[in-house]
Image (cartoon, rainbow, N blue to C red):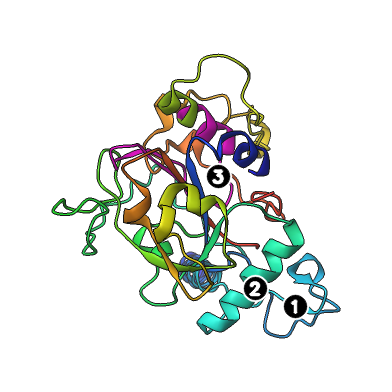
């Protein structure tokens, strides 16, 4: 009788821990609590992503793996940057309403992209 | 990152794409109690609109006095998702338009020094010293340093981390990654 009670208690504790782990990971993933994004589990290899956007090089398949042509994008700037005139010439955006297209920048010199945010 | 930009902006295009916040303030936080997640009166909640993201990006760039051309990511679809970059990630594209370096995805992943070494290779720079310093990441549970000590060539596939290379969750996110 006592053994059965013990087994049931252990089972309940396991279930509770499982729920707690799931809740913690869900909340962290959503950033609701302001916590950071979770790291992938140890040894996790992310599957290759299927990219449907056009690549920076016309006619080539886009991808984000090494050796692939990255997907193109057109984004607005914080402000006009004079350095872009060096690379884009007359095509350089003149106001914040003009967008910068990655495909216009690649193919001449290396391009370094840092994607991130303040927090 | 500022130092890297100053050193190489004449030889390479260097851009920042401002994407989804990694560690936004909680909804009930105010400018008074949000700590570093607020600059002046601007609290860094997760933006719900493009205009909100633009305002945060402008505030952050002004705060950092960031000289690097900064682009604002769209909400949906977003470049951050397409590039699998959240919370942050560094990419290097060669002059032929191919990806030659993809850093480890954050939160502790961006390694500007590693990116600089790869950029120097692309530019054929062999003289002089890199302007950035190797990244130091606190190791969890008594393990030694890692990350910056690993050869860049071994870490090109940023996702293929072995268990011993999984970076720890920082107690406070690195606020100076773009500095």
Instruction: Name the residue tied to disc 1.
Output: B42
User: Tag 3, which chain?
Assistant: B
* Circles 2 and 1: CB atoms closer than 8 Å: yes
Q: What is the x, y in percent for residue B139?
A: 65, 36
| Residue range corresponding to the magenta coloring | B91-118
Q: SS at mark 3?
A: loop
Q: Please state the horizontal and vertical placement of residue B176, each as a whole percent of the image.
A: 71, 50
For marks 2 and 1, the one nearer the N-term is 1
Residue furthest top in the image: B127
Q: What quarter of the picture does the C terminus of chain A occupy?
A: bottom right
Q: Residues within 10 Å of mark 1 (few under 14, many from 20)?
A: some
Chain letter of the residue carrying label 2? B
Q: Nearer the viewer, mark 3 or mark 2?
A: 2
Q: Is residue B92 covered in magenta?
A: yes
Above or below, A110 relative to A4 = above
Establish if B141 lies above or below B121: below
As drawn, the residue found furthest toward the front would be A90
Mark 2 to mark 1 CA distance (whole Å) = 8 Å
Under tag 2, what secondary structure?
helix
Give the label on residue B110, or none.
3
- Residue B56's disc is 2
At numbered mark 1, what does the secondary structure look like: helix, strand or loop?
strand
Q: Position of residue B33 (x, y in %)?
A: 84, 76
Dot 3 crowding, Cα within 10 Å, few <14, some 14–19, many 20+: many
Distance, label 3 to label 2, CA atoms, is 21 Å
């Amino acid at each position: 009788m006592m053994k059965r009670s013990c087994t049931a208690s252990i089972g309940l504790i396991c279930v509770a821990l499982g729920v707690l782990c799931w809740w913690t990971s869900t909340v962290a993933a959503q950033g609701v609590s302001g916590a950071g994004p979770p790291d992938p589990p140890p040894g996790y290899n992310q599957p290759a992503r299927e990219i449907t956007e056009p690549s920076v090089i016309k006619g080539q398949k886009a991808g984000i793996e090494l050796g692939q042509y990255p997907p193109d994008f057109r984004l607005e700037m914080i402000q006009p940057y004079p350095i872009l005139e060096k690379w884009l010439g007359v095509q350089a955006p003149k106001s914040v309403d003009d967008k910068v297209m990655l495909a216009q920048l690649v193919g001449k010199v290396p391009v370094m992209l840092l994607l991130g945010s303040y927090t | 990152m500022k130092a890297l930009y100053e050193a190489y902006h004449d030889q390479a295009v260097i851009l920042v794409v401002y994407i989804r916040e990694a560690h936004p303030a909680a909804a009930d936080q105010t400018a008074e109690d949000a700590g570093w997640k607020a600059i002046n009166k601007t609290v860094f909640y997760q933006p719900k609109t493009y205009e909100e993201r633009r305002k945060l990006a402008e505030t952050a760039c002004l705060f950092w006095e960031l000289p690097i051309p900064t682009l604002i990511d769209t909400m949906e679809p977003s470049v951050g998702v397409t590039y699998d970059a959240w919370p942050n990630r560094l990419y290097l594209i060669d002059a032929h338009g191919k990806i030659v370096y993809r850093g480890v995805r954050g939160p502790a992943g961006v390694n500007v020094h590693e990116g600089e070494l790869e950029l120097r290779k692309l530019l054929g720079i062999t003289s002089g010293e890199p302007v950035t310093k190797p990244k130091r990441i606190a190791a969890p549970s008594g393990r030694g340093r890692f990350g910056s000590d690993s050869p860049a060539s071994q870490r090109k596939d940023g996702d293929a981390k072995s268990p011993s290379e999984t970076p720890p969750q920082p107690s406070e996110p690195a606020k100076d990654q773009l500095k």
